[in-house]
């Protein structure tokens, strides 16, 4: 799937994935604008709120944001996300039906895996890249490094407990494609409508990831 390879390349270039939880779809447009202004045209919009689908549609309409749907737990959510314009699918764990539906729809699936058994299951499902979630409480960068010994071909996107203080630990590993997290897009900052702060947090993260 060359489309999937393309997408992995774009994630690898971005190095950072803001994990977005939107309570109100009206925030989607200024949020996307704030991320782009901070130098990061990437967003993973999670299916944790009613606003998710409308937010995905709004951000997809820009055409310049690498757009994932997160917290995708069921195949019907894959369809809804892809129909709304999501380019890839992220799940907290590994669901074979979700991975299969993503493949059927021609989009990349990034399921969460933290054990060797889960990684083997992802490989058997035809995947070469996985989310590593929750990264911080699952052993962090040393665990990913250890898992890369038997799985040198697997690329990881650690998410959960990642922030400015430790993103470099992850990004310095050759097996880490990108890191994800909510620290660039805190819920309370979005609720307050402080999109300048989102841009500042994003720009700071971009600078750290480049360093
Ligand atoms: C996720 O879904 O990946 C997490 O909610 C993001 O974790 P964080 O809030 O610790 O960054």
Image (cartoon, helix red, strand yellow):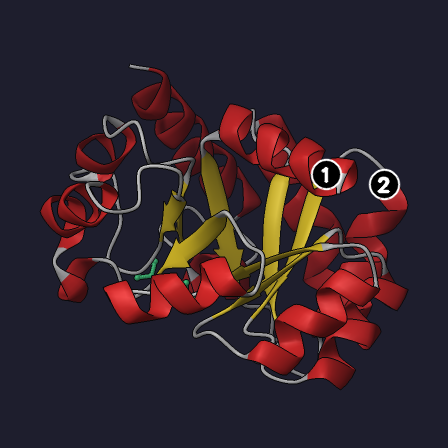
Residue 95 in view of the camera = yes
SS state under label 2: helix
Q: Nearer the viewer, residue 209 or 29?
A: 209
Where disc 1 sits, the SS reads: loop
Residue 113: x percent and y percent? Answer: 36, 65
Depicted 185 relative to depicted 94: above or below:
above
Which quarter shows the N terminus? top right
Residue at image location 24% in from the left, 30% down from the top: 173
Disc 1 marks which residue? Answer: 65
Quadrant for residue 139, please give it.
bottom left
Q: Which residue is at 65% across, 54% downward?
A: 68
Q: Mark 2 and 1 residues: CB-CB less than 8 Å, in contact? A: yes
Measure the alpha-carbon separation of dots 2 and 1.
Answer: 7 Å
> How many residues crowd mark 2 within 10 Å: few (<14), some (14–19), many (20+)?
few
Say which of 49 and 191 sits in front.
Answer: 49
Q: Is mark 2 within 8 Å of ligand 1?
A: no
Q: Which mark is residue 62?
A: 2
- Quarter of the picture holding the C terminus: top left
Residue 92 spot, x, y in % from top left: 44, 72
Q: Is residue 111 visible in this depiction of the protein?
A: no
Residue 120 to residue 1: above or below: below
User: From the viewer's perspective, is residue 108 above or below residue 176?
Assistant: below
| Rendered residue at 83%/50% (across/down) | 60
């Amino acid at each position: 799937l060359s489309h999937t390879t393309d997408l992995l390349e774009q994630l690898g270039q971005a190095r950072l994935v803001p994990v977005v939880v939107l309570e109100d779809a009206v925030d989607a447009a200024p949020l996307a604008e704030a991320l782009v202004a901070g130098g990061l045209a990437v967003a993973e919009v999670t299916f944790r709120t009613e606003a998710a689908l409308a937010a995905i549609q709004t951000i997809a309409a820009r055409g310049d944001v690498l757009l994932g749907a997160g917290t995708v737990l069921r195949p019907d959510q894959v369809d809804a996300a892809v129909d709304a314009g999501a380019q890839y699918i992220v799940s907290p764990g590994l669901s074979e039906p979700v991975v299969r539906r993503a493949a059927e729809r021609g989009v990349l699936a990034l399921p969460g895996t933290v054990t060797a058994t889960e990684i083997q299951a992802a490989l058997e499902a035809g995947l070469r890249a996985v989310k590593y979630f929750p990264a911080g409480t699952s052993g962090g960068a040393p665990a990913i490094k250890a898992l890369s010994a038997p799985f040198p071909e697997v690329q990881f996107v650690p998410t959960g407990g990642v922030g400015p203080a430790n993103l470099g630990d992850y990004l310095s590993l050759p097996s880490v494609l990108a890191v994800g997290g909510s620290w660039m897009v805190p819920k309370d900052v979005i609720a307050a409508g402080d999109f300048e702060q989102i841009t500042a947090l994003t720009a700071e993260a971009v600078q750290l990831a480049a360093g």
